[in-house]
Image (cartoon, rainbow, N blue to C red):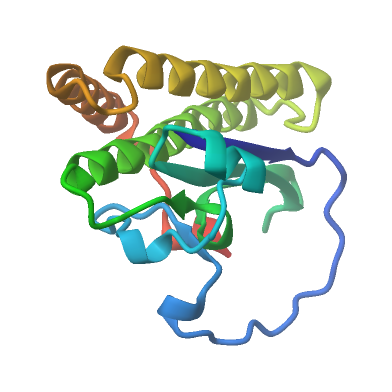
Amino acid sequence: MKHLLVFLLLLPFCSQAQKKQIVPEDEEPIICWQEGIKLRWGHFQSKFHPWGEAYTKSTKYGACVSAEIAVDPYKDSRGKNNFNVKCFFKKQESWVRDSTFVLQFALLAHERLHFDICELFGRKIRQVIAREYALGHNVFGSELGEEIKCLLMENEDLDALYDQETSHGTIAKEQQRWAALIKRELASLEAYKSTAANCK
């Protein structure tokens, strides 16, 4: 199961650059989606399910990823409006009931794919922003804003369908089918993948 929070900021960007304090990777509160970097149970640091302590006690589910897509406005080097799209995992809001139980590897694979779905929609959003930017359109316009909102809603819908069809990762054949599907979709949008620059 995935807990998705989304920030869509459509305000002009204006702030002075600040020095970023270097924090050891294990102490960073977030993990940006990067090819080749896989989530592990040690990254799931919340003691409670993100929906609250009562839900933690009542739910039958064993883990929950908290991932976000942040769409942040800025002025690029040409002085044109643009967006930075960041896909990241929040350690302090991601929860696992018991990382030692017998199906732990299957459950972790299921949760990792939720994060990959987040990245998939990050790529789709970057694609539509790049299209509008290349056409010379104002990317801060309401039409693109609506398209981005629709993609964010599609992300939530696909996450729910994924959980439903895999029974939260317990149907191995369906889990494999979804993993192959998302892998193909990510490959088709390779040009728009997350990079270290997106995570600044």
Residue found 46% across the figure and 36% down from its top: 118
Residue 85 is situated, as x and y percent measured from the top left of the image, at 58, 45
Q: Nearer the viewer, residue 199 or 143?
A: 199
**Tally of numbered tags:** 0
| Residue 52 in view | no
Place residue 193 in its image quadrant. Answer: top left
Q: Is residue 27 left or right of residue 174?
A: right
Place residue 99 in its image quadrant. Answer: bottom left
**Vertical placement of residue 91 versus 182, above or below:** below
Residue 14 is situated, as x and y percent measured from the top left of the image, at 87, 60
Residue found 48% across the figure and 64% down from its top: 45
**Residue reaching furthest front?**
57
Q: Quadrant of the N terminus?
A: top left
Q: Quadrant of the C terminus?
A: bottom right
Q: Nearer the viewer, residue 152 or 91?
A: 91
| Residue 106 in view | yes
**Vertical placement of residue 91 versus 65, above or below:** below
Residue found 76% across the figure and 16% down from its top: 143
Residue 90 is situated, as x and y percent measured from the top left of the image, at 54, 56
**Vertical placement of residue 86 versus 185, above or below:** below
Residue found 76% across the figure and 75% down from its top: 17
Residue 106 is situated, as x and y percent measured from the top left of the image, at 19, 39
